[in-house]
Amino acid sequence: MFDNLSDRLGDVFDRLRRHGALTEADVATAMREIRVALLEADVALPVVRDFVTAVREKALGQEVLRSVTPAQMVVKIVHDHLVEVLGGDEGTARVNGIDLNAPSPIVVMLVGLQGSGKTTTAAKIANRLKGQNRKKVLLASLDVQRPAAQEQLAILGRQIGVVSLPIAPGERPVAITRRTLQTGRTEGYDVVILDTAGRLHVNEELMLEVAAVREVAVPHETLLVADAMTGQDAVNVAKAFGERAGITGIVLTRVDGDSRGGAALSMRAITGKPIVLMGVGERIDAIEPFHAERIAGRILGMGDVVSLVEKAAETVDQEEAEKLAAKLEKGRFDLDDLAAQLRQIRRMGGMGGMLNLLPGIGKIKKQLDEANIDERIIKRQEAIISSMTKDERRNPKLLNGSRRRRIASGSGTSVQEINRLLKQYQDMADITKKMKKLGPKGLARHGLAGLLPGGLRH
């Protein structure tokens, strides 16, 4: 998300940095370019107007024009105002995007249009609350409009080990709500998630149904699930639900597929409600809390190392990491270890997902694109390693020509791809041996101690 906006703003700031001192004309030109960049990113016009006016007033202050690095001051002003527009730290007070400061069972109601990703989001939130917060969660589908919608939620519930309310054919949404609340109270659930029905557009029938359910459920959280890729339409939907459904927060889905990001900037400003979660992929764990400060950093090419570290902490298998550390300490590294590293990269969102969180990556994004980094390579490399025998994985020297042809046939790849993988493995194995020879003290002298896993730093 925000790729286009980030590129455009990066160009604006690069031009500002070429000036030793800034004049009012320089700032005016930059503000015009920022205005165009925001509009092209699908940010709503009133939001753009307010944003540019506020930034211009601060940027024309004497302390900016006379500062040692005026361009950096302008970047800071834009950054701080982006944080403000995106909601400051409103969303960070929530636990995994949900306000859990209420008596059990806490009722969370999801509303939005059909196709916005409500059902998948309900399962993602349940999975996160169950896994990270040890909450007992009950899922309930109130969608009697869309064929198989209730069964879809039940299937997702089984996949993540979360109970969904048994389906009663012919039961209406309000009755389902009452049964859900009763089950939640009598069976000791911490959180109840209500997945309401959507329509293809905002209409009176949809709003009346949401109002009826809301009256019975009295939800602690009413979250609007909106597709980030719908741009200005998402803003109109947010406004309608904000006025009629009393939403408390917004969940943006398909954030990974939208390079503009204008919906995120507009929806918070227009509804006054915080964006609390964002869906960043199709996997059931591909959802993360929305942090305004971190998102502003991503937009301005400052990266988001905190999120990268958190993602690593969530996905790393501690036992697997300790075993690898012990092997590295002895200078050993085989293809099973390489496969484990590939799985870790995939769990963290692939190379693209990781690179987007690193500072300054926007500057080399085009070169990376030209280098044609293909996320499918990771899966193909895993397939190659899976097609090897245990002995071959432990001792790659066994891989002669006939064995490589067999593996290529079994993994649906080519011998050339196997050769590239083995070259990659050999490079990593050589580094491991050098690390062993240097030892922890030698690594520290060379400034490389930080590259070692925790188990190798003494």
Image (tube, helix red, strand yellow):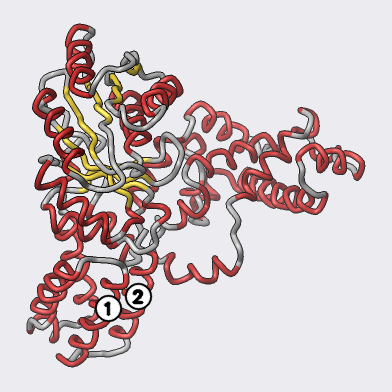
Quarter in which the N terminus is drawn = bottom left
Q: Nearer the viewer, residue 366 or 1?
A: 1
Residue at the spot 31% in from the left edge and 64% down from the top edge: 299
Q: Position of residue 425 (x, y in %)?
A: 70, 47
The secondary structure type at the circle numbered 1 is helix
Q: Position of residue 254 (x, y in %)?
A: 38, 49
Secondary structure type for disc 2? helix
Tell me the amino acid under the disc marked 1. Answer: Val
Q: Is residue 259 above or below residue 395?
A: below
What percent of the width, then of the height, locates residue 135? Answer: 27, 21
Check residue 332 in the rendering and tell me which mark sits there, or answer none.
none
Give yes or no for contact between labels 1 and 2 (Cβ–Cβ under 8 Å).
yes
> Local crowd at mark 1 within 10 Å, few (<14), some, or many (≥20)?
some
Q: Where is 104 relative to 295, above or below? A: above
Q: Is residue 340 above or below residue 37?
A: above
Instruction: Write down the quadrant of residue 392 in the picture.
Output: top right
The residues bearing labels 1 and 2 have C-alpha atoms spaced at a distance of 9 Å
What residue is at 22 percent from the left and 24 percent from the top?
173
Q: Position of residue 183 (x, y in %)?
A: 22, 11
Q: Kindly give the residue lying farthest to the top in the view shown.
A: 186
Give 259 or 78, whichever is nearer the viewer: 259
Q: Which mark is residue 8?
A: 2
Say which mark, if any, is on residue 36: 1
Q: Which residue shows up at 41% across the image and 27% down it? A: 148
Q: Nearer the viewer, residue 324 or 104?
A: 104
Q: Residue at x 25, y 77 (%)?
A: 34
**Can see residue 406?**
yes
Q: Residues within 10 Å of mark 2 (few under 14, many from 20)?
A: many
Using the rendered view, name the quadrant where residue 206 is placed.
top left
Amino acid type indicated by mark 2:
Arg
